[in-house]
Amino acid sequence: MSHHAQSPEIAAIQIATERIVTQLRRQTREQARLIRSGAAGELTEADVERMARDITAAAHAQLDAVTQDWQSASDDPGMQATRREVAQLMAAGSRQVDADLREAWQAQHEKVARRRWFR
């Protein structure tokens, strides 16, 4: 995200977005670790999909709470560009959450299958 902000509002949105995305990544890594270790219990693929949606929805809710005060500045081209950039970042983050959790689930699923095979 660019930091040559045109206004304090844009700078605040950029900083908040970066904080939320960092938190999203941290939470995803932790959940993936729990899934891989088996500490999350036996999960179905649907459970993992739901978990990814919930994590992403929480991040979007945080972002919505931060940006709702600046809705009136929507005519500002800088704000419009920032919103597009934020939307792209959040979409990429959502895809990454889904991919990381699915990968962790698959790894755990294969590990359990190998254990059963070698018994």
Image (spheres, rainbow, N blue to C red):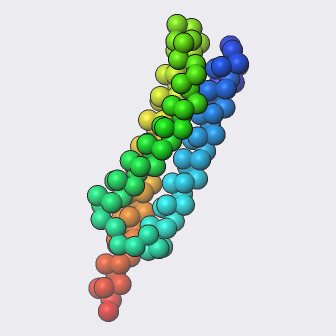
> Is any atom of residue 71 visible in this view?
yes
Residue at 58 percent of width and 19 percent of height: 70
116 or 31: nearer the viewer: 31
**Left or right: 90, with 13 as reference point:** left
Towards the viewer: 66 or 10: 66
The residue drawn where x is 68% and y is 13% is: 6
Asked if 38 appears above or below 6 in the picture, the reply is below
Residue at the spot x=38%, y=76% of the render? 111
Position of residue 80 relative to residue 89, above or below, is: above
Location of the C terminus (image quadrant): bottom left
For this view, does 72 lie left or right of residue 40? right
Q: Position of residue 7 (x, y in %)?
A: 69, 14
- Where residue 31 appears, as percent x and y from the top left, is 49, 61
Q: Is residue 5 visible in the rendered structure shown here?
A: no
Q: Quadrant of residue 108?
A: bottom left
Please state the total of marks drawn on the protein image: 0
Counting from the top left corner in percent of width and height, residue 118 is at: 33, 89
Q: Is 17 placed left or right of 91 in the picture? A: right
Which quarter of the figure has residue 81? top right
Q: Please, is residue 87 above or below residue 37 in the view?
A: above
Displayed quadrant of residue 62: top right
Identify the image quadrant of the N terminus.
top right
Residue in the image at 57% along x and 8% along y: 76
